[in-house]
Amino acid sequence: MVKVNAPALSLDASGSIAGTLVFSKWKGRNYVRELVKPANPRSGGQVGMRAAMKFLAQQWAGLLDAEKATWEGRAANLVASEFNAFVSYNLFRARNFLAPSKEDPAGAAGTIATLAGASATAGVRSITYEDTVTTVNDNWAVAIYRGTAPGFSTAYDNLIAIVEASAAASFAYVDSPLAPGTYYYNSRCITEDGLLGAEEGEVNATVV
């Protein structure tokens, strides 16, 4: 349905018409574009970007005021909020297989956490990936990747989740729903300054 302030096709129209055209506004500019639907909304790239977006949206509120202030310049250039600047910059980094950062710009520095060693446990149409942070150092989170064959290489398009890991504690991620089969997992630590650590080591589990 098209929502307008005046008759349809006005300059302030927003929404879609007949599932073919989209009316909207970006940075104060009205525009019309073709409605495009992803051919595969569950592709590796789509899943990876949604995982990164979910993590970033959850983390913004917990950033220190000083950390949020570093995004003011980028936000001004984008004519957007500091939150939008934080998300867009870090999604760009994710697309290029770089880790997110709490501050702008990312220095890709710091000391990653020490982890106890991951495990993968199968459940009903699910696998639970677990690990424990033993020494935090400058760690912020852990990126979790999934493959369907052993020895897979971690990449942005097999990222399935980013979980906060900034305290000495255990964490778990439930990967679901899954079809029957064997799934392989690996992870990499992320520091607050956007350093992506080395692969921790592969584990697997089989869903029947």
Image: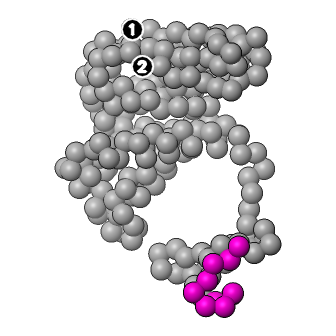
Which quadrant would the C terminus be assigned to in this image? top right
| Percent x, y of residue 13 | 62, 82
Q: Quadrant of residue 185?
A: top right
Name which residue lies at 68% across and 26% down: 177
208 shown above or below 73: above
Could you say whether the residue bearing mark 2 is in a helix, strand or loop? Answer: strand
Q: What's the residue at 47%, 45% (across, down)?
A: 93
Q: Would you name the residue on which mark 1 appears?
A: 116
Q: Which residues are magenta?
A: 1-10
Badge 1 element? loop
Q: Position of residue 52 (x, y in %)?
A: 50, 41
Q: Amino acid at mark 1?
A: Ala
> Nearer the observer, disc 1 or disc 2?
2
Residue 119 against residue 94 in the figure, above or below: above
**x then y, percent, for residue 79:** 39, 71
Instruction: State the mark number for residue 171.
Output: 2
Mark 1 or mark 2: name the one nearer the start of the chain: 1
- Please say if 202 is above or below 68: above
x and y percent of residue 202 in the render?
A: 56, 13
- Specify whether residue 200 is in view: no
